[in-house]
């Protein structure tokens, strides 16, 4: 069975009607509700967190070699069979496939890569500098 979940960073500026403790910039995981006055993620039945919609990313359903979940917007190190590392961004590609992107034009479908070759090293929101030489 496929797990469908999302993550987003908490955004508290101007958010006054949510009850609970919010820590700006912390990642939260759950079900998104985007078409409301304040976009938020439901953490549990009684808890919701306001999020910055620009940080929203979907879980790909896959994990890296260490068991870390891979999300849309993650930056991964992909090891080639010869050991050479490539730094890639995880994104949704044409026809609904999760891909890793090398620069502008090169993409590989994420599900075709041996998970022992992939390590999550960051994401485009927290460590965009990891992609600086990737264009």
Image (cartoon, rainbow, N blue to C red):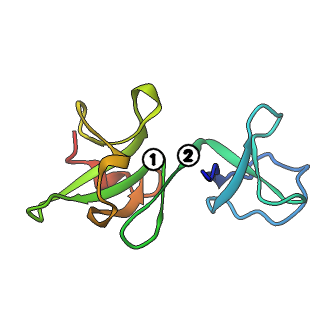
Q: In this rendering, is residue 108 above or below 27? A: above
Q: Work out which quarter of the rendered image holds the C terminus and state it.
A: top left
Left or right, residue 6 beside residue 15: left
Q: Can you name the residue that lies furthest to the left here? A: 82
Locate residue 126, reporting x and y percent: 46, 57
Q: Position of residue 28 (x, y in %)?
A: 66, 59
Q: Is residue 18 left or right of residue 57?
A: right
37 up-or-down from 6: above or below: above
**Of the pair 1 and 114, the residue shown nearer to us:** 1
Q: Can you say whether 16 is above or below 53 in the image?
A: below
Q: How many marks?
A: 2
From the viewer's perspective, tell me whether residue 73 is left or right of residue 21. left
Classify 10 Å Cα crowding around label 2: few (below 14), some (14-19), many (20 and above). many
Residue 24 % position (x, y):
67, 59
Residue beneath the point at 29% across and 49% down: 88
Q: Residue furthest top?
A: 95
SS assignment at label 2: strand
Disc on res. 57? 2
Identify the mark nearer the N-term, 2 or 1: 2
**Location of residue 90 in the rendering, given as x and y in whole percent from the top left corner:** 39, 46
Q: Residue furthest front?
A: 1
Label 2–label 1 contact, CB within 8 A: yes
- How far apart marks 2 and 1 lie (CA) works out to 6 Å
Label 1 crowding class (10 Å Cα cut-off): few <14, some 14-19, many 20+? many
Residue in the picture at 25% in, 54% down: 87
Which labelled disc corresponds to residue 73? 1
Q: Secondary structure at mark 1?
A: loop
């Amino acid at each position: 069975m496929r797990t469908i979940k999302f993550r987003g960073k908490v955004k508290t500026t101007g958010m006054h009607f949510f009850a609970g403790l919010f820590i700006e910039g912390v990642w939260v995981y759950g079900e998104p509700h985007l078409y409301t006055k304040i976009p938020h993620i439901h953490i549990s039945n009684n808890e919701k967190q306001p999020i910055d919609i620009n940080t929203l990313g979907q879980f790909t359903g896959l994990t890296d070699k260490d068991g870390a979940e891979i999300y849309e917007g993650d930056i991964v190190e992909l090891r080639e069979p010869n050991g050479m590392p490539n730094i890639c961004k995880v994104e949704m590609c044409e026809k609904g496939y999760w891909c890793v992107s090398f620069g502008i034009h090169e993409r590989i479908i994420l599900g075709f890569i041996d998970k022992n070759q992939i390590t999550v090293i960051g994401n485009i929101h927290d460590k965009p500098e990891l992609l600086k030489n990737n264009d």
